């Protein structure tokens, strides 16, 4: 699978599906990698050219030991599109992937067809909280936060009934480079798109998890209120709704993409 150079950082990309099909690009959350989209990729690769990538600092992508910015995360996607000679792609991002999607919708709209913003927010958390998390992972490693993260990402019922799926996500978290996680955390800490997203004029779907304590329904409703004409859907899930409610999530996207 190709590696794309994004301002000196190698970005790992995987591509599936017919060469001439419309492109659907998936962007992962903080602390995961492109495999969080395995179920969606398997489904959509029948009709779409599915492009997945590890956001910088994650998976097999490079992890520069510096704070990142939202602009840099957005430009990484533009570099992928340029490197693969893709003029325009539908974009689906969850959490941090959604932050990246908002940036693209605002500042690179000609490269995006339809925009899916999932379990995300225009601004999230207090800088003090993010600084504390950065210090924790750099000082103690990813193991120090993994249990708390999983409790926010999945409902108690799902954690008990779908232990193998949760274990896969646990491994993604534990194998994320602490400095990569910290770099992306700095980008999230400094992000505030609450007013700027009002300029997004793309067909947009916003997906929220009814039990998501990380990016709440209220956060999603604010995004929906800012983006004129956007569609809004709630799923019976916590933060990683594409895993907890995989079929409903996939069906919702498929209906939106038409």
Image: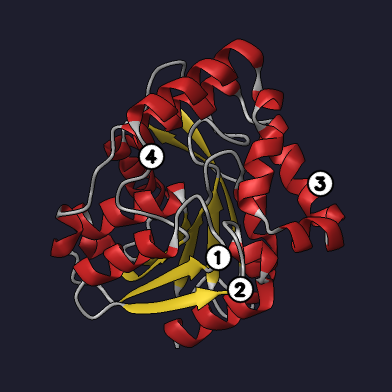
What residue is at 22 percent from the left and 55 percent from the top? 108
What residue is at 85 percent from the left and 54 percent from the top? 163
Q: Nearer the viewer, mark 3 or mark 2?
A: 2
Q: Nearer the viewer, mark 1 or mark 3?
A: 3
The spot of residue 195 in percent (x, y) is 15, 54
Q: Nearer the viewer, mark 2 or mark 1?
A: 2
Q: Quadrant of residue 93?
A: bottom left
- SS type, badge 4: loop
Label 1: which residue? 50
In the shown orientation, is residue 187 left or right of residue 182? left
Label 3: which residue? 167
> Depth check: 99 or 74 in front?
99
Label 2: which residue? 236
What residue is at 30 percent from the left and 52 percent from the top? 122
Q: Residues within 10 Å of mark 4 (few under 14, many from 20)?
A: some
Residue 243 visible in this rendered orientation of the protein: yes
Which tag, 4 or 2, sits closer to the chain's start?
4
Which tag, 3 or 4, sits closer to the chain's start?
4
Distance of label 3 from label 2 (alpha carbons):
21 Å
Which tag, 3 or 2, sits closer to the chain's start?
3
Distance of label 1 from label 4 (alpha carbons):
32 Å
Q: Residues within 10 Å of mark 2 (few under 14, many from 20)?
A: some
């Amino acid at each position: 699978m190709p590696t794309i150079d994004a301002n000196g950082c190698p970005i790992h990309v995987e591509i599936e599906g017919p060469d001439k099909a419309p492109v659907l690009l998936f962007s992962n959350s903080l602390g995961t990698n492109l495999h969080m989209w395995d179920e969606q990729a398997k489904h959509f690769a029948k009709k779409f050219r599915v492009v997945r990538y590890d956001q910088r600092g994650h998976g097999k992508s490079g992890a520069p030991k510096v704070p990142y910015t939202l602009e840099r995360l957005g430009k990484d996607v533009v570099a992928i599109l340029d490197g693969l000679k893709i003029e325009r792609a539908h974009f689906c991002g969850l959490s941090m992937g959604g932050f990246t999607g908002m940036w693209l919708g605002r500042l690179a709209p000609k490269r995006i067809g339809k925009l899916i913003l999932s379990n995300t927010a225009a601004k999230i958390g207090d800088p003090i909280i993010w600084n504390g998390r950065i210090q924790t992972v750099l000082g103690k490693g990813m193991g120090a936060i993994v249990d708390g993260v999983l409790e926010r990402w999945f409902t108690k019922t799902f954690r008990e009934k779908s232990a193998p799926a949760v274990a896969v996500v646990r491994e993604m978290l534990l194998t994320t480079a602490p400095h990569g996680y910290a770099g992306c955390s700095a980008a999230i800490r400094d992000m505030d798109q609450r007013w700027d997203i009002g300029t997004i004029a793309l067909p947009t779907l916003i997906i929220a998890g009814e039990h998501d304590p990380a990016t709440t329904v209220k956060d999603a409703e604010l995004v929906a209120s800012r983006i004129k004409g956007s569609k809004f859907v709630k799923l019976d899930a916590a933060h990683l709704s594409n895993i907890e409610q995989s079929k409903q999530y996939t069906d919702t996207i498929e209906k939106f993409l038409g």
